[in-house]
Image (spheres, helix red, strand yellow):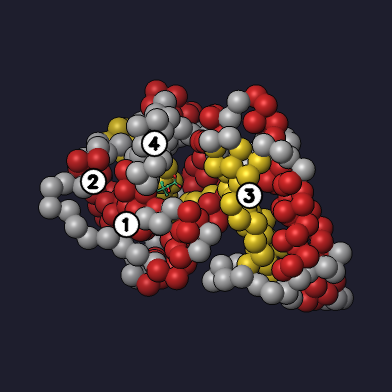
Amino acid sequence: MKIIRTPRSMTAWSERLRREGVTIGFVPTMGALHDGHRSLIRAARLRCDALVVSIFVNPTQFSQTEDLTRYPRPIARDRALCREEGVDVCFEPTAEAMYPEGFQTTVTVPALARRWEGEARPHHFSGVATVVTKLFGIVQPDLALFGQKDYQQTALVKRLVADLNLGVTINVRPTVREQDGLAMSSRNRYLSTEDRRAATILYRALQAGRQAIEAGRGTASTVERVMRQTVEQEPTARIEYLTLCEPASLEPLEHVKRRALLLGAIRIGAVRLIDNVVVAGPDRRQRASRPGHP
Ligand code: PAF
């Protein structure tokens, strides 16, 4: 496995392979790799000839209150995982190489970034949109893979790729979960044993919301109440948002007809957890159960 540190060498590598007709798969990460990343890497490996994983803790997507310096950086373990999974290149640029003196351009996706995570973390998504656009320019992948756990991020990346004609196919893979349902995340390692137990409440709340929809109680007020009441059973959990929204626009939904997105963020102690599930509404379920429906 090659380790490339400069944007220029990374682009030169990709350009050479593309000239030879090789397809390039790309998994952008901030390191601290876990089984969620592993599943993205495996899915990319199956779909492309060559595979690049970037490991870059992007400073511009952290706020001043979030501790950039504390973000885990187990680089030896990350490289070992990449080697095990047959990654061809680990791209590990420095912040200075990504944001050299004079850097000033930012990418924003205003409507998709406004709500939910965007409210709690105002500059986060312009940091993400900017670095993802830069990484796509540097790596020049045919296909890039993202996890559904960061649902709002995936919606925003799809939008910017379409709006800016970036020509990269985006593949969103299902959230990988621990056995008790907790979505895998690099932040889970900050949870104490007791908080780790409590953390499953978010997924349980989303499941309770899903059950309400499937039982025909698909109004926002009911679904959101059911989710809130579930989280409230866990005294250490603080709700940031628990919402029913439209999966493409992420705008709040009053009533589920076709597909709906249940989106949530809670805090357990100092750790902020996010998760989501997509649910088929009654119209979709009816169509799927009609004879002849594939
Ligand atoms: O999801 C992440 O790890 C990051 O937001 C990403 C996409 C690598 C951009 O820094």
Q: Say whether disc 3 or disc 4 marks the residue closer to the N-terminus.
A: 4
Disc 1 to disc 4: CB gap under 8 Å = no
Q: Amino acid at mark 2?
A: Met
Q: Quadrant of residue 263?
A: bottom right
Instruction: Identify whether 249 is placed above or below 117.
Output: below
Residue 96 visible within the image: yes
Badge 2: few (under 14), some or many (20 or more) residues near its Cα, within 10 Å?
A: some
For the residue labelled by badge 1, is the local secondary structure a helix, a strand or a loop?
Answer: helix
Q: Amino acid at mark 3?
A: Ile
Disc 1 to disc 3: CB gap under 8 Å = no
- Calculate the distance from the C-alpha at mark 3 to the C-alpha at mark 4: 21 Å
The percent position of residue 82, horizontal first and vertical second, equals 44, 32
The percent position of residue 89, horizontal first and vertical second, equals 35, 38
Which residue is disc 3 drawn over? Answer: 239
For the residue labelled by badge 4, is the local secondary structure a helix, a strand or a loop?
Answer: loop
Q: Amino acid at mark 1?
A: Thr
Residue at 40%, 30% in the rendered image: 70
As drawn, the label of residue 98 is 2
As drawn, the label of residue 130 is 1
Instruction: Identify whether 279 is placed above or below 292.
Output: above
Instruction: Identify whether 56 is placed above or below 222.
Output: above
Badge 3: few (under 14), some or many (20 or more) residues near its Cα, within 10 Å?
A: some
- Calculate the distance from the C-alpha at mark 2 to the C-alpha at mark 3: 35 Å
Quadrant the N terminus occupies: top left
Closer to viewer: mark 2 or mark 3: 3
- Of 55 and 57, nearer the camera is 57
Residue 55 visible within the image: no
The percent position of residue 229, horizontal first and vertical second, equals 77, 52
- Of 60 and 20, nearer the camera is 60
Residue at 30%, 32% in the rendered image: 3
- Calculate the distance from the C-alpha at mark 1 to the C-alpha at mark 3: 29 Å
- Calculate the distance from the C-alpha at mark 1 to the C-alpha at mark 4: 20 Å
